[in-house]
Image (cartoon, helix red, strand yellow):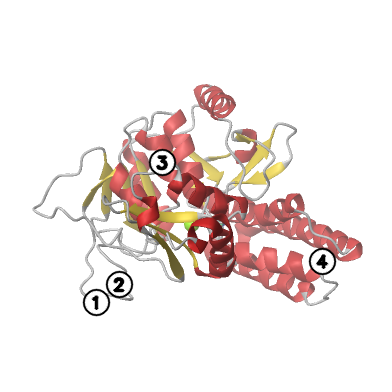
Amino acid sequence: NKVVAIVKKAIIKDKTVVIVSALGGITDLLLMAAELAADGNELYKEKLITIEQRHMEAVKQLILVAQQSQLLSLVKKGCNEIEDICNGIFLLGELTARSKDRISSYGEWLSSQIISATFSAAGTANEWKDARELIVTNSAFSIADVDFAATNEKIKQFFEARISSLFIIPGFIAADKKGITTTLGRGGSDYTAAIIASALSAITLEIWTDVSGMMTADPRLTNNAKIISHISYQEAMELSHFGAKVIYPPTIQPVMSKNIPVRIKNTFAPEDAGTLIESVATKNGNIVRGISSINNMALISLEGSGMIGIPGFSKRLFEALSSEKINVILITQSSSEHSICVGIEAVAIEKAKQAVDAAFSNEIALQK
Ligand code: ASP
Ligand code: MG
């Protein structure tokens, strides 16, 4: 109902496209059910019951009994499909990335159908459109890459031919060239919205979430953390990568290239100003926009006089790490060239140390 109120205000002014995420926790439940089924664990059936109940409950709360039947049968149909797929996974005892995407796609499919019907029941005409017919990706299931040329073309074509003033579209899901369901990565609904906003050169992109914007620090760690009112695209991208999980990092790129302002707003406190992300953020005396942190990191530092003035040390360090498929999160090198320091995930530290020790065994033996 809060969503309906927020959207109704927007459509008075402009043609509006609403991208819907799954109900809270549903994507996790869907994937959990699929994993249990693949393990031959019948408990998957209980997860499916919970998933169905959550959606049925939402329908019953949002829509008058007399108007419910069509939506209830749609929700039931979706839930039956989820069950059929999970039964298949249970029988086969195997779960591919492709099947995971198929299963997790139902979260957004169901929520967007419910939202669309809720608008209709509230007298707001709208058009539901399957994102799989608009967003084309490669077949890298679970975190597919968008084919922007094909996608932009499809989006433009679809919207040009339409007169509705309100569109409801499931986020997170897409399809590859063969039409097989793919997904854009966890949190990907924000990205769907940015892709569509960019293709349509939208006036603005609003991300409605459950916090009142990006913050100067993690409020769980810093009790005087404040909401950032203005931030540039670059700063927002950096903060979103550094653990400020308000917005899915890939979201910024498509809107930044079109200079579309992004507003992060709180569904539960719509009057709060939120955070405005645009090309140049106004300076309000604060040069440092925010500080964020990542847990469970490890630092490797490579030190020695043997590196000074000799090209190729960093290449060898990064090669050693990349050959072990270790992802580097942060890099520093002092100007004296006496040390290089890289941040990696703590779980990879043993593997990393072995790889680096092996790569530099000669220098280490020579005490360089
Ligand atoms: N439902 C998906 C997820 O949980 C996408 C999203 O919420 O943006 O990852
Ligand atoms: Mg989300």
Amino acid found under the numbered disc labelled 2: Pro
Q: Circle 2 sits on which residue?
A: 219
Amino acid found under the numbered disc labelled 4: Ala
Structural crowding at the residue carrying mark 2, measured as other residues with C-alpha within 10 Å and reported as few (<14), some (14–19) or many (≥20): few
Q: Earlier in the sequence, mark 3 or mark 1?
A: 1
Structural crowding at the residue carrying mark 4, measured as other residues with C-alpha within 10 Å and reported as few (<14), some (14–19) or many (≥20): many
Out of 142 and 350, give the one closest to the viewer: 350
Q: Earlier in the sequence, mark 2 or mark 4?
A: 4
**Residue 5 in view (yes/no):** no
Amino acid found under the numbered disc labelled 1: Asn
Task: Name the front one of labels 2 and 3.
Answer: 3
User: Whole-Å distance between the Cαs marked 3 and 1?
Assistant: 46 Å
Disc 1 and disc 2 in contact, CB within 8 angstroms:
yes
Disc 3 and disc 1 in contact, CB within 8 angstroms:
no
Seen in the picture, residue 43 relative to 186 is either above or below; the reply is: below
**Residue drawn where x is 33% and y is 33% of the image:** 203
User: Whole-Å distance between the Cαs marked 4 and 1?
Assistant: 43 Å
* Residue 311: numbered disc: 3
Q: SS for tag 2?
A: loop
Q: Circle 1 sits on which residue?
A: 223
| Rendered location of residue 167, percent (x, y) | 50, 39
* Residue 38: numbered disc: 4
Out of 122 and 26, give the one closest to the viewer: 26
Q: Earlier in the sequence, mark 4 or mark 3?
A: 4
| Residue 268 shown left or right of residue 176 in the figure | left
